[in-house]
Amino acid sequence: MAGIFRHIIFGLSAIHLDLFVSNAFSVSNSNSAMLSRLQDIQTELVVSVGRIPGTAMPPEWAASGAKLGFALEVEFTNEMCEYEMSKERLLRGDVLMGNTLMSVEPLNDPSFVSSNGKEIIQVLPGAYGCQLQGIESKQYAFRFFLDFPEGAKRNDVELPPERIYFLSSCWLGDETVIGRAQKRRDEIVKSIDQITQDLEEMQ
C-alpha cells in the first residue's frame, strides 16, 4: 500500500489524514486511477480551527489564541455526488480536474466543549475529486468539501455556517520500492532481536 495524504490547510482549517492508496498507476486513466483507490476509504479528520500566523485574518478573530478542535469521521464513497455539487467551481478547479466528482459522507456527529458545555456540530455530505499534477511523481491534487449549515463557535473562534473546502496532495507509490523498504525493516528488527538475545545470554 502506498501514497500518503499530507497535512491539509485551507482558510481557517487544518487537518491531518493518514490514508493510503494502492500502487496501480495509469496515465491514460489519469484522475480515475486515483479516484478508484480513494473509494470506500473511511478515516478520521482531526480538525483544528484557529488563527494561523501570517494569514489575512481579521485582527479580532481568534485573537485570544483559542482553538476549536473536533474529530470528524468521513467516508469517501464510490457514489457520484449530487448534480448541484458537481457544478461547484471551487472544487472543480480547472478543466484538468475532470467531470467525475464523488460523494463524501460524514459518519459521526462531531462535538467540542465550550463554556456552554458539550456542543454538536452538524455536518452534511459533500463531494471530492482529484487532478493529476505530475506524471513522473504520480502526484495528484486532492480536494473535497463538506457543508456546515450551523457552523460552530468557541470563544472568539468561529467556524462559519457555510461550505468548507479542504485541499491536499496525494501520490500513487511504487510497490516495489515499498516492498524493499519493508524487507529492510524486517531485517533490522530481526537483527535487533538477535542482539538482544546475545546480550541476555552474556549476562
Image (cartoon, rainbow, N blue to C red):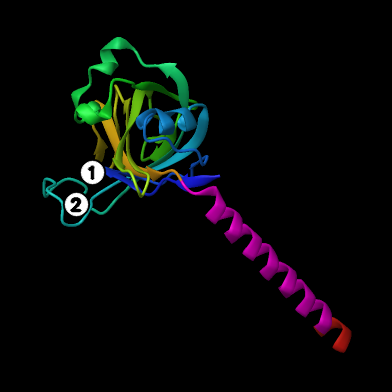
Residue at screen point 49% across, 49% down = 174
Whether label 2 touches label 1, CB < 8 Å: yes
Q: On the picture, is 26 further left or further right than 13?
A: right
Residue 109 is at least partly visible in this image: yes
The foreground one among 30 and 105 is 30
The foreground one among 119 and 180 is 180
- Disc 2 to disc 1, how far (Cα)? 7 Å
The foreground one among 21 and 177 is 177
Q: On the picture, is 43 further left or further right than 14?
A: right
Please state which amino acid type lies under the numbered disc 1.
Asp
- In the image, residue 163 lies at what x, y percent? 26, 26
Image quadrant assignment for residue 120:
top left
Residue at screen point 73% across, 73% down = 191
In the drawing, what numbered circle is on residue 113?
A: none
- In the image, residue 79 lies at what x, y percent? 44, 16
Secondary structure at numbered mark 2: loop
Counting residues from the start of the chain, the first of labels 2 and 1 encountered is 2
Q: On the picture, is 25 further left or further right than 130?
A: right
The foreground one among 168 and 170 is 170
Residue at screen point 29% across, 10% down = 83
Tell me the chief SS of the magenta region.
Answer: helix
Secondary structure at numbered mark 1: loop
Give the extent of the magenta segment.
Answer: 173-198
Residue 203 is at least partly visible in this image: no
- Quadrant of the drawing holding the N terminus: top right
Residue marked by disc 2: 63
Q: Say if the magenta span includes residue 189.
A: yes
- Quadrant of the drawing holding the C terminus: bottom right
Give the answer, above or below, for where 88 lies relative to 137: above
Residue marked by disc 1: 156
